[in-house]
Amino acid sequence: MKKAVVLLLAVLMLGTLAVPNFGAGTYSEKVEQEYIVHWDGSADLKFTTALYGPPDLLNSTKESLSEIGIDNATNMMVNQRIKTFSQLGMNLVNASGTVKGYDSDGPLITEITGKVLNFAKYYSYDGVWEITLDVLRVSQLSQVDVTSLNQTFDFEDYYSIILPEGAEILNVPSSYSMESGKSSISLKVDVSGNEIHVNVHMHFDEGITKEDLQKLYGEFQPFVIQYKGKPGPEGNYSIWGSRTETNITVGKDETVIDTLNEYITPEDYVNYLKLMVAYQGEDTIIESMHQSYLQTFQEQGIEVRDWNITFENLNSPGPLKIRLHWVLTNYTQALNNTYTHDPSLGLSNISLQGRLNGGINQTVVIRITLPQHSEFTQLPEDIDVEANGSRITMKVTKVSENEVTIESSAYIRYGMLAKDYFAMMEKLPPKAEVKYTVGEEKTGTCGPALLLGLAIVPLLLRRRK
């Protein structure tokens, strides 16, 4: 029984690519997916899979079905399909399934019907609906190294997307084909009215290499259907919120830097960070952070005289807070007379295709305090850059002859197009410099991004695949 369950989990749930031994012959599978899309972003689903071979795998799977029972196998199949959609940011509801061909000599056919919520995503940023399809099975193939299986694969996939009545199609990706050695990919697209049909054939020869896969997939772009029509709900998405405050107190002999990093939202990500600290241990993570900062300082000729790192709110609700305290010598002399600030708050170099699938709300405040008989000799201009509701600002305030405050913020809208995002970033200067003198000696400080604790831009901001 246990062996049968394991096999079915692989074949019906994880995909037959997870099976360690296929037997002789070509693995052949056909998948048909039909989606009837509604203006609320949901879609009626019919998902049919037919397994044709190899014979040993096909027969073993049928025997396992009989052993554990068709009803149990069907429930396993439906539950895993629900999980698969959930991993893609969608919800499969009212799902039911059937298994056919288990008592015949023909293919084994599984069929799932139901409703997929959040199948199409609406972006108020530009009033566009988008549907993203994993037409080349990237998610499935990423779970296994097909180059090590010594097996020939034939995948035939059919997609039928029926858009809601009145939809204005803006973009449907073009057909695509690529060959490498004896392996090939062919993707054909046909549009008729509000219906989009996609036919994909993927043949992987048993001798396929990583170089073959790189060539087959290297030029392929995410398959995204775009259309306009009625507005809809934007659904659930994450706002990546953080706040950093850094006080730099410059002295003739030493500089003290105190930083407070607050990771505010999304709540599940903040809780994940807290869990990682608990799992790995505070002392371990603190020492790792200490060594990382220490290396950065040493590479710049800066000596660390004293330091302290503490976590707050680890066992209570609210933001995760990290406090860092550094007492440094040779700081101003080592860094070439200038404090350098990044107006983009580290957001200019993120990898982004299509559009952001989350929002950003980030604030950084820097306070620089000089000792008596010192002065600021150069301050940057204020910055205010806006693009369709997204905005990046930097305000420089000279509080007194000895104190300057830099307040930077970045508010990036959910769904902002990549071309608009990078066009906005190009309007920003690459750096903003503050120069000053201490006593009679002209000195300064360059604030590394590491010190300022700029918020990490999570991978989840990238396009959903």
Image (cartoon, rainbow, N blue to C red):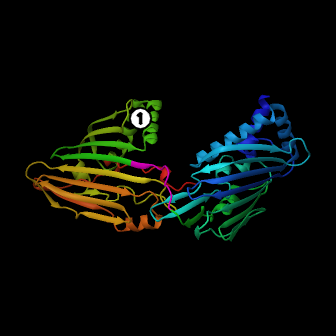
Q: Amino acid at mark 1?
A: Ile
Q: Position of residue 86 (x, y in %)?
A: 59, 45
Q: Residue furthest front?
A: 165
Q: Which residue is mark 1?
A: 285
Residue range of the region highlighted in magenta in the rendering: 231-240
Q: Residue furthest right?
A: 105
Question: 251 or 136, which is in the foreground?
Answer: 136
- Image-based side of 170 in relation to 54, left or right: left
User: Residue at the spot x=88%, y=46% of the render?
Assistant: 55
Q: Position of residue 229 (x, y in %)?
A: 54, 66
Vertical comparison of 41 with 63: above or below: below
Please check the rendered image and state whether residue 234 is part of the magenta-colored stretch, yes or no: yes
Label total for image: 1
Please check the rendered image and state whether residue 57 is part of the magenta-colored stretch, yes or no: no
Q: Where is the N terminus found, in terms of image quarters?
A: top right
User: Residue at the spot x=75%, y=39% of the render?
Assistant: 74
Residue 75, picture quadrant? top right
Q: Main secondary structure of the magenta part?
A: loop
- Image-based side of 333 in relation to 359, left or right: left
Q: Position of residue 322 (x, y in %)?
A: 33, 38
User: Residue at the spot x=48%, y=55% of the render?
Assistant: 234
Q: Where is the C terminus found, in terms of image quarters?
A: bottom right
Secondary structure category for the residue under label 1: helix
| Residue 451 visible in rendering | no
Q: Position of residue 40 (x, y in %)?
A: 55, 56
Question: 75 or 18, which is in the foreground?
Answer: 75
Q: Mark 1 packing: few (<14 Cα in 10 Å), some, or many (20+)?
A: some
Vertical comparison of 177 with 268: above or below: below
| Residue 2 visible in rendering | yes
